[in-house]
Structure formats: structure tokens, C-alpha cells
Amino acid sequence: MADAYLAIEGLTKAYPGVVANDDVSFDIMPGQVHALLGENGAGKSTLVKMIYGLVKPDSGTMRVNGELYEPATPHAARASGVAMVFQHFSLFDALDVAENIALGMDNPPPMRELAARITEVSHAYGLPLDPARRVGDLSAGERQRVEIIRCLLQNPKLLIMDEPTSVLTPQEVDILFETLRKLSEEGTAILYISHKLDEIRALCEEATVLRLGKVVGECDPREKSARELAEMMVGETLHTPEREAGETGEVLLEVTKLSLAPANQFGTRLKEVSFTLRAGEVLGIAGVAGNGQDELLAALSGERRTAADAVRLKGDGIGRLGPNARRSRGLLAAPEERLGHAAAPEMSLTENALLTGDIREKLSKNGFVGWKKAREFAARVIEAFDVRTPGTETAAGALSGGNLQKFVIGREILQRPDVFVVNQPTWGVDASAAAAIRQAILDLSARGAGVVVISQDLDELMEISDNFAALNEGTLAPPRPAKGLTVDEIGLMMGGAHDMDVAHPEEAHV
């Protein structure tokens, strides 16, 4: 076996009150696709930040090709052949592809030469890009191509990828995997982080599992089931969400020819969106990021106003009502962006519980906040949804992403909505937390609520949805029963094949 490209020995990093990484050791070989697995808070983010020069370890060593590797900055990491594609894009919508790539390079060539290189490299790796296109006009999948090509132009020997498929259709995932396999064949090592365990099994040949900052196992993921991998991560038997069989009831929510201009020039216009939602029904809406999901949630939650009768709740037109008025009538919503939209990062969990729970939980009276009741409500959310936090007065921004997501979802579900609209309910959370959130959604529908789940996770939608629709460029395909749909059919619907017979996807040209 060849020598390791990256050898990690005893890396430790502690913050006040928590040891993020505790004596972590493992090797990544040249050309190896190596998975890094762990539940939220396991230490994955801290570890890759140390590899990429964003965080300095307290102790331990890293070696690249046998030489001591101590990157003080990402610039130093890139100079050593380490590149990283982050989960959240760092692109400027108003600039074109070439300009964005130049900004992310340490020594960019002249723009004409760079444009030619972008065209050449992007086509060579099956990720074609037009260097002159404005990034604001690109799909989410194309934006990810920009991030990847920016890394590839610097000839990395180790490519770190953090949740790279969260914004891709199944067809785009296949293209990405072909690219990564080609890079692997050329000798590039890939460190791959994802909560999608079936992807890990399909792509990776080695996996290191972290739990509470420590390495708890290594394996060949191709020899494990997704459930076995998940149980290695959490250290216990994984609960599979179950739903009670039951019939749907009366129509709770009617959306009729809902059209809405985008909030800004890079948003998506909603075009005559129509659907109905019944009591006890879970309606799953799929779509690649940037196809109108945020606009749809804003129109349903009351953040954006519409024609009164475009949105009807239990027969009453509510399109012109704001969020609080809709909440009082039983329609609650949880947006995709946790920090800054669903929760205020500098405010405590008690204060964040008050922000949306005031009306239905009666947390204030005559203009005065009942802080005791607010704390009790926050504590109920923390207990019911197993939110790992020191207490109710902890700032929302101090929680890990997965724990904040559990708090946000729990805060709305415990208010007993008649209709619950949620965008990306398990985005970025581990298998155990995702199962708990999905079970809570199914339990809510079993109690007679109607639930609209907007998600890019197709496995999630097929697991919990009664009916399924796809959103593409602001247009919603007619909902159809989820049972019997294939991933290929769903992928074509997400790509805009609304008017075709998706029962025969091989006849489609998308």
C-alpha cells in the first residue's frame, strides 16, 4: 500500500466546556475516497477546519506526504494541495462565473486565459460551465460546479467535500460522482462528508466514524448497510419512523393559482401554484434549491402577502393576513434558514420560544411577557425533542446546527398547529435526529394536522409523504400519490418535466 497522503495523529481541539476533537487519528491514501461520518456535534466540522487551516489544533500532528503539515491559513492549505468545497456557497450573484472563480484563487491568471481554462477543465470533468454567465442566473447545481471547478483549477491533491449533494437532483448527483471517481483515478484523495449514507456506500471505499469528538470506528462502507453505518454513528439502535394508517379528512388548506413576484432580482417568481391539503395528510414538495421554495413558504406563512383567496385556511381567505394572524388561526411555519430567520442567534432559547410561541402559548398578557411561562415552554421543547443544550438561557447561535433544528421544529409542533409548513426539516442533521423529526411530523399528521414538507431530500419525502409534487422555476407539478414513484421519475419532475408522462422517463429529454 502506498504511503498516506494525509496522516492525522492525535489531533485534539477543545473549547470552553467541550472537547470538539479528542485524540483523533486516521490516514487518507492518494486516490482514496474517504468518508468522515458522525452525528451533529461529533466533531467533523472542527476536524476539517483544522485540515484546511481555519482552526489551530491544541495538540497532535498532521503530515502531508510524510512532511509536517501545520497550515496557519486556508492559503497555506491550498499551497500544500488541500482544497475544500463548503456546504454553503461563497459566490457573488452579480458577478459572472470567471470573476467568482478568480476571487477564490490565490494567483488568478488574466481573465481571458482563466475563461479558457474554466471551459477546458469543466468539460474535461463532465461539469460544463460558461465562464461568462452571471452566477445569479445559475441553478444551485451549476453554482456548485463553480465551487468545484475553482478548486480543480488549483490542482488539489486532497479535496474536502462537505454535504455536496444537498442541492442536487438525482441526475446531477450521478454526474458529480462520475467526476469524483475520475479525480480519484487520477490520484486525488477525497474526504467526503455527508449525512446521506446510501451515497457514502455507493462512493466511498473507507470511512472514519466520529462520536463525541473521538474516533469510534473505521470500516469499508460498501460492506455495511446504511442502518449499520447510522448505528455506528449514534452508538445505539436507530429508530425507524412509523406512521399510523388512517384516512385523510376535510380540506384544511387550499392554494389556488398563487402567483408571486420574487422579493429580489435573484429570487424566483411563483407561477399559478395550486394544491389542496387535507387533515391528516403529508404533502411532500421536492425541488432543487432556488426554484421557489423560499417564496412558497413566505406566501404560505404570511411573510409575503398575496390575493386574499389565493390562500384559504379552513375555507377563509388568508392571503392578506400576516404571520401572527395566521398563527392564531392555526397555520404555523418553519423556514429553511435556521439562524437569522427561524431563530435569532444572539437571543436565548427562551426568547426564541417567545418569538413564535407568544400567541398560541399565551406567553404574554396586557403587553407584559410572562418569562416563567416562556422558560417552561422552551424547556418543554428541549425535553421533547432531545435538544442538547446547557439550558433555556443558552443563545440559539451557540447550539450545533442539528440541535437548533430540533428546537425550531419542536417549537412549532408543540404549538399544535392545524397546518404546518416546513422547509428542509432535517437539513444538515444526523440520522438519529432526522428520524426523530420525521416521526414528530408523522405524529402531528396522525393527530389530524395537515403538513406541507418542502425538501431536497428525496428519501425523506418518500418516507413520510402521502402525496408528492415537484417545484421547478416557480411552477408546481400537480400532486400525485407518493406510493409507487421512482427516484428517476421524481428527478425528472424536479428538473421540470411536469407535462410529460413520468411513467416513461426514458422518453424524456431534459
Image: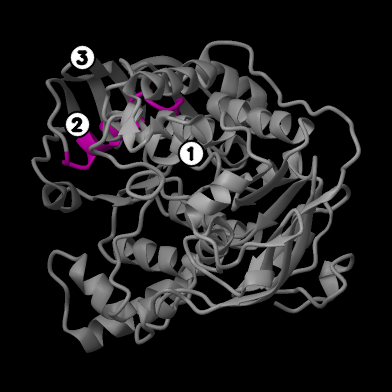
Compared with 311, 112 (above or below) is below
Q: Which residue is the extreme one toward the front?
A: 366
Q: What percent of the width, then of the height, locates residue 452? A: 67, 50
* SS at circle 1: helix
- Res. 17 mark: 3
- Res. 71 mark: none
- What is the spatial separation of the Cα atoms under label 3 and label 1, in whole angstroms? 35 Å
The N terminus, quarter of image: top left
Q: Residue at x 88, y 72 (%)?
A: 501
Q: Nearer the viewer, residue 377 or 187?
A: 377
Q: Which one is in front in this view, the residue at disc 3 or the one at disc 1?
A: 1
Circle 2 crowding by C-alpha within 10 Å: few under 14, some 14–19, many from 20: some
Bounds of the magenta segment: 37-54
Residue identified by numbered label 1: 359
Q: Is residue 89 left or right of residue 102?
A: right
Circle 3 crowding by C-alpha within 10 Å: few under 14, some 14–19, many from 20: few
Q: Of the residues shown, which amino acid type is indicated by label 2? A: Arg
Q: What percent of the width, then of the height, locates residue 264? A: 39, 76
Residue identified by numbered label 2: 63
Q: What percent of the width, then of the height, locates residue 41? A: 37, 25
Q: Quick check: marks 3 and 1 in contact, CB under 8 Å?
A: no
Q: Is residue 1 visible?
A: no
Instruction: Give the mark, 2 or 3, whose residue is nearer the N terminus.
Output: 3
Q: Nearer the viewer, residue 276 or 144?
A: 276
